[in-house]
Image (tube, coloured by chain):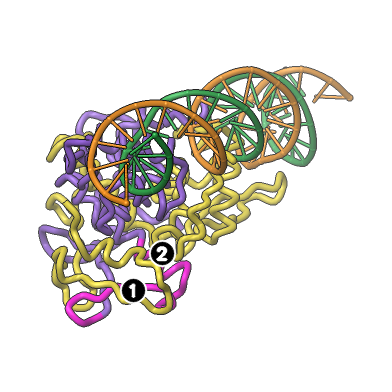
Chain colours: A yellow, B purple, C green, D orange
Amino acid sequence: MGRTADYSRQTCPIAATLEVIGDPWTLLILRDAFNGVKRFEQWQERLGVARNVLASRLKTLVMHGVLRTEPYSERPPRHEYLLTDKGRELRPVLLTLYDWGERNIYGEGRSPNRMVHDGHPFRPKMVCASCGEEPGSRDLRRVDQDVAAPTVGEALARDAG
Amino acid sequence: MGRTADYSRQTCPIAATLEVIGDPWTLLILRDAFNGVKRFEQWQERLGVARNVLASRLKTLVMHGVLRTEPYSERPPRHEYLLTDKGRELRPVLLTLYDWGERNIYGEGRSPNRMVHDGHPFRPKMVCASCGEEPGSRDLRRVDQDVAAPTVGEALARDAG
DNA sequence: CTCAAGCGTTCTTAAACGAAACCCCCTTGC
DNA sequence: GCAAGGGGGTTTCGTTTAAGAACGCTTGAG
């Protein structure tokens, strides 16, 4: 059946998220959206993605409320795609992907572009929102509510290497 | 050419990262790897992914150094797949995906499983590793090294909504 | 000797992709 | 008035990939 995302049956926030943004093109579309891209032709040109694929991705992003359309011309009828709040909350996802690639593919400091926060190099660090500490691999636990299958909590609570 | 990831030409850490882990199954494989899964049959059973696809994904993860194989039996020859350091550094990626799904799909606190850090609910927060501040949308800048095309820095430095 | 576990590979079929053509609506220029 | 062009897609068609089931291989157990 092609790639009809049958991992949907998984009751897990990660799987659920991937239903929405799990496509590689989708993430690049969002990257460019954060980059200020708003229109069909801009994405098409930058990404080189097939037009039908782009149209389809934009449609599902709108459907899922990650992007919304906003008319910018009546005649001819034209609209642009803007990030919603829900979409804007994906920034940390893009930032962690960015950071991983920069360090693990390009090699520390050899990335073609880097980010600067207030004058100093920016690197994202993940901390616990409540206590501000960086959680180790051991002190994160999962709590199930009403699910039997051990899905994801241990996932991130435990190291396996 | 099917989906031969031609966004490879993009000189961008995000695109580069997606070359490695941009497939939806790959991310679920990694989720389970963090969950303690180490063997072919375990993944196959949990994910319900086609065996040929699983084999192919594991192969490329090993090729990219995200997983490594470790023999656990000589006769018959068997090995398991373990996260490398490089792979373990993907934890923040999984955590941000988890968090986004929990909040934006299940709705605050309604996720089937949640995470607990040292007794209190865990939510990841992203801060600047240097100064510890949570970067706003305005105070992040991109610095190009030798690339002409405006690719990603603005992406994350600027809001577009 | 047969069976089962564990890890894939091979095969067929049905989606999804990629590329290019085509279409609609409107504006501009001649 | 009519061709040219920009913007935003949809249609068509050939190719690639994924899904799913079957098969193969090696070894240990009964």
Give the labeled residue for mark 1: B114
Q: Where does residue C16 sit, x and y in percent of width and height? A: 57, 39
Q: Is residue B29 left or right of residue B129?
A: right
Which mark identifies residue A13? 2
**B117 shown above or below C9:** below
- Which residue is painted at 57% across and 52% down in the image? A60
Q: For the residues tagged 1 and 2, is the chain the same? A: no
Residue B142, quarter of the rendered image: top left
Q: Chain of mark 1?
A: B
Do the residues under discs 1 and 2 have CB atoms within 8 angstroms?
Answer: no
Residue placed most toward the observer, C23 or A103: A103
Secondary element at image label 1: strand
- Which residue is painted at 12% across and 40% down in the image? A108
User: Do we see residue B151 in this rendering?
Assistant: no
- Which residue is painted at 17% across and 43% down in the image? B72
- Which residue is painted at 23% across and 81% down in the image? B120
Q: Is residue B56 covered in magenta?
A: no
Q: Is residue B116 covered in magenta?
A: yes
User: Do we see residue B138 in this rendering?
Assistant: yes
Kind of residue indicated by mark 2? Pro
Q: Where does residue A14 sit, x and y in percent of width and height? A: 39, 59
Residue placed most toward the observer, A126 or D7: A126
Which mark identifies residue A16? none
Residue density around tag 1, few if under 14, some if 14–19, many if 20 or more, within 10 Å: many
**A132 shown above or below A27:** below
Residue density around tag 2, few if under 14, some if 14–19, many if 20 or more, within 10 Å: many
Secondary element at image label 2: helix
Q: Where does residue B147 sit, x and y in percent of width and height? A: 27, 30
Q: Which region shows up in magenta?
A: B98-120
Q: Where does residue B32 sit, x and y in percent of width and height? A: 32, 55
